Image: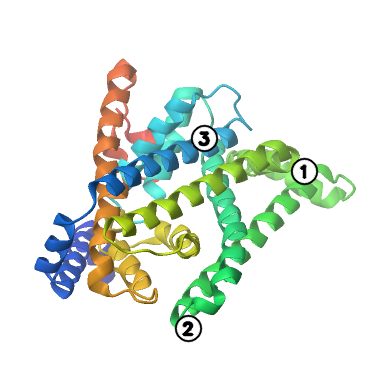
Amino acid sequence: MRFSFIRRHSFSLSLVGAIAMLVGIIHHVGVGEIASALTEVDKGYLAVALMLYAGTLVFTASRWATLIRLVHERVHRGKILQFSFIDKFANAFFPTSAVGMAARSYLLQKEYGIPKTKGFATIVLDYGVDIVGTLLLAIPSMFILRSHLPGPLQTTIGACISSLAIATVGIVVVNRRVTLNGDDRTAPFRWARLERLSKHRLGKKVFEFVATFRHIVHNPRRASRALGYTAGVRCFEAVRMMVLFKAFGMSVPVYYFILFETAWVFIAPFMATPGGIGAIESGRIAVFSLIPGMSTGAVAPVVFVDRFITFWLMVAIGAVALALYNKDAGVGRFSLSFLGSSDPSTRSS
């Protein structure tokens, strides 16, 4: 009975939880302290931070476009950027990133005729490349700062790096298994089972999905390019956070923020509140407060400005992107009424 009530009212409960967390953070830090810091922020550094985030968005869209071209050559990078904005708008209303991923899969099918399973696979692959690239940057940063990190921060970052390493091994194993299953016909029994599975409707969807992962193995040039874009994303994000701290009169080495990205890239998709509201703010404040010489009161205004740039501003831009897409789509307008559904195509208008 209780589980049924929670499931029916999950959105309302998560929204109430998000608001309560935000109110708790503001109350703990102090409204006056936050307001005072916000009025003294350096506008020049803030403008630089906004430009750096624009670079992050372009690099992220370029990486996804590179991976989409593994299954469909003719995609427009500007359109992919628009889909990324719509993804951010969709994710603002529900916990985790699942709804935005479903929206992007649907839009790829609607715009380019890419099957939803293949479109979804490119999105998952995009997350995978992000994990691998972030890990490659985090490990040297960890060695550089190891002697300067306090114990709790070392434990937190170490756990995140270990999780990313496990995920990376999983990605490699999946790609290896898929390649072997697709190319090794010397095991007749295994191949016969795969052949029978491929004849079923669900089996065909599975094969479409896993076949997308095979492309990354056979296209090392594009895989390298995607990893290069990930390096650009992480560096832009790290420098942006360094600049934001500078805007509030605090100097923090950029290596710290490269390490912190390992936490957010792994945790953010699983936040239990709509858009991660409250959860991300409290998490970032808690981690940034572990930097030597930093306090909760000092880092809270930085986090709120960061969330304005990366969340609230992106929700507004995403709404505009959706409106522009529907304006150009004519009779093929895309509706977000499917949000929360596992099959968006059944509720599009």
Q: Which residue is pictured at 57% across the width and 37% down the height?
A: 118
Q: Are marks 3 and 1 in contact (CB under 8 Å)?
A: no
Provide residue 185's location: percent of width, then percent of height: 86, 44
Residue 142 shows in this picture = yes
User: What amino acid type should be assigned to the residue bearing mark 1?
Assistant: Gly
User: What amino acid type should be assigned to the residue bearing mark 3?
Assistant: Ser
User: What amino acid type should be assigned to the residue bearing mark 2?
Assistant: Gly
Q: 276 or 337: nearer the eye?
A: 276
Q: CA distance from mark 2 to mark 3?
A: 37 Å
Location of residue 264 by image quarter: bottom left
- SS class of the residue under badge 2? helix
Instruction: Name the residue that disc number 2 marks.
Output: 151
Provide residue 314's location: percent of width, then percent of height: 29, 42
Of the 4 image quadrants, the one containing the C terminus is top left
Q: Residue furthest right?
A: 186
The disc placed on residue 62 is 3
Location of residue 107 by image quarter: top left
Mark 1 or 2, nearer chain start = 2
Q: Which residue is pictured at 51% across the width and 43% down the height?
A: 123
Q: CA distance from mark 3 to mark 1?
A: 29 Å
For the residues carrying marks 2 and 3, which lies nearer the camera in this image? 2
Indicate whether 129 appears above or below 294.
Answer: above
Describe the colour scheme in one phrase: rainbow
Q: CA distance from mark 1 to mark 2?
A: 46 Å
User: Neighbour class for label 2 at 10 Å: few (<14), some, many (≥20)?
Assistant: few
Q: Are marks 1 and 2 in contact (CB under 8 Å)?
A: no
Mark 2 or 3, nearer chain start = 3
Q: 158 or 202: nearer the eye?
A: 158
The disc placed on residue 182 is 1
For the residues carrying marks 1 and 2, which lies nearer the camera in this image? 2
- SS class of the residue under badge 1? helix
